[in-house]
Image (cartoon, grey):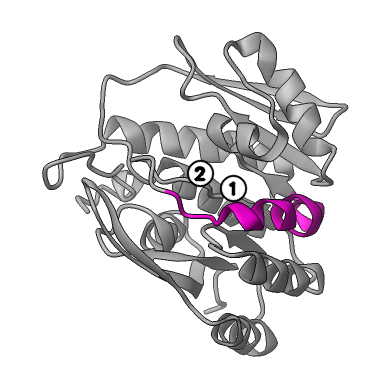
Amino acid sequence: MSAPPRVLTVAGSDSGGGAGIQADLKTMLALGVHGMSVITAVTAQNSLGVQGAWPLPVEAVVAQYRSVVDDIGVQAVKTGMLASAELVEAVAELIGATDAPAVVDPVGVSKHGDSLLAASALDSVRTKLLPVATVATPNLDEVAQLTGVRVDSEDDLRRAAAAVLDHGPRWVVIKGGHLPGEAVDLLTDGFEEHWLRAPRHDNRHTHGTGCTLASAIASELARGRSVPEAVTAAKAYVTSAIAAGFALGGGIGPVRHGWALGVRD
């Protein structure tokens, strides 16, 4: 039996299991690809927030990446929490030398507002990481961090996308989930536009949505889909995962990654 498509996540660990490496690998399993991981940081994290974060040494991150890519190979790479300028630059160099699409989730803050990226690393994200991205997936807070553009309404999404594209990714998904009304995202390469709309579910348990969307896009790209096809399929997967989200602990619970498999994770 042949191996499934292989996807590598380069991200931080979430000890609560709702986001980060754990969410990425659950998403990849649900979508039928083989997930592999490079852990960039360890966090003490639960449904209430992030209690601590410890980046790994650059040498450990590079060694994990080379170990996987040089032997097993990859059909797509996804990045999440990279924590420091040194890690951002090292990962950008690795991705730039890898012949596979890269989905960059420029993680800046957690769902609870905890910082996951040093302020000194923002310029490295702009100048090193975004230029090697096939698809970048910033939320509205991350757009503001990276470009200074504030999005207050759906009409602002085009301006936000243009500002991110100026930093070099081939495509960008501006995630408008924090806007009122429908959950609307804009996917564009500066020429084509795809407006992705979904009903808003009355469910506060949405921890891990950003990680899950980026991992789903990478999984679909690894399966050979075009960027618009991959992002559309990923949006549908995440929308259903949000609808099935569940309470866990005393705060914000996670989305249900295994919904498509009938799995109660």
Magenta span: predominant SS is: helix
Q: Is residue 45 above or below residue 111?
A: below
Whether pointer 1 and pointer 2 mark residues with C-beta atoms closer than 8 Å, the reply is yes
Q: Secondary structure at mark 2?
A: helix
**In the depicted view, which residue is nearer to us: 21 or 258?**
21
What is the quadrant of residue 254 in the picture?
top left
The answer to whether residue 228 shows anywhere in this view is no
What is the quadrant of residue 190 in the picture?
top right
Q: Is residue 253 above or below residue 14?
A: above
Disc 2 target residue: 213
Residue farthest along the left direction in this orientation: 250
User: Residue 49, how many percent across, how many down?
Assistant: 27, 48
User: Residue 204, how many percent across, how many down?
Assistant: 26, 29
Q: Which mark is residue 217?
A: 1
Q: Please indicate whether residue 225 sits to the left or right of residue 21 in the image.
A: right
**In the depicted view, which residue is nearer to us: 132 or 227?**
132
Q: Which three-letter amino acid code belongs to the residue tagged 2?
A: Leu
Density class for disc 1 (Cα within 10 Å; few <14, some 14-19, many ≥20) is many
Q: Residue at x 75, y 36 (%)?
A: 164
Q: Secondary structure at mark 1?
A: helix
Q: Is residue 125 magenta?
A: yes
Residue farthest along the front direction in this orientation: 120
Q: Residue at x 32, y 21 (%)?
A: 201
**Which span is picked out in magenta?**
115-134
Q: Which mark is residue 118?
A: none
User: Residue 133, how many percent across, how many down?
Assistant: 75, 53
Q: Which three-letter amino acid code belongs to the residue tagged 1?
A: Ile
Q: Residue at x 31, y 50 (%)?
A: 258
Q: Please indicate whether residue 227 sits to the left or right of residue 235 in the image.
A: right
How many callouts does the rendering have? 2
Q: Is residue 117 above or below residue 109?
A: below
How far, Cα to Cα, is label 1 from label 2? 6 Å
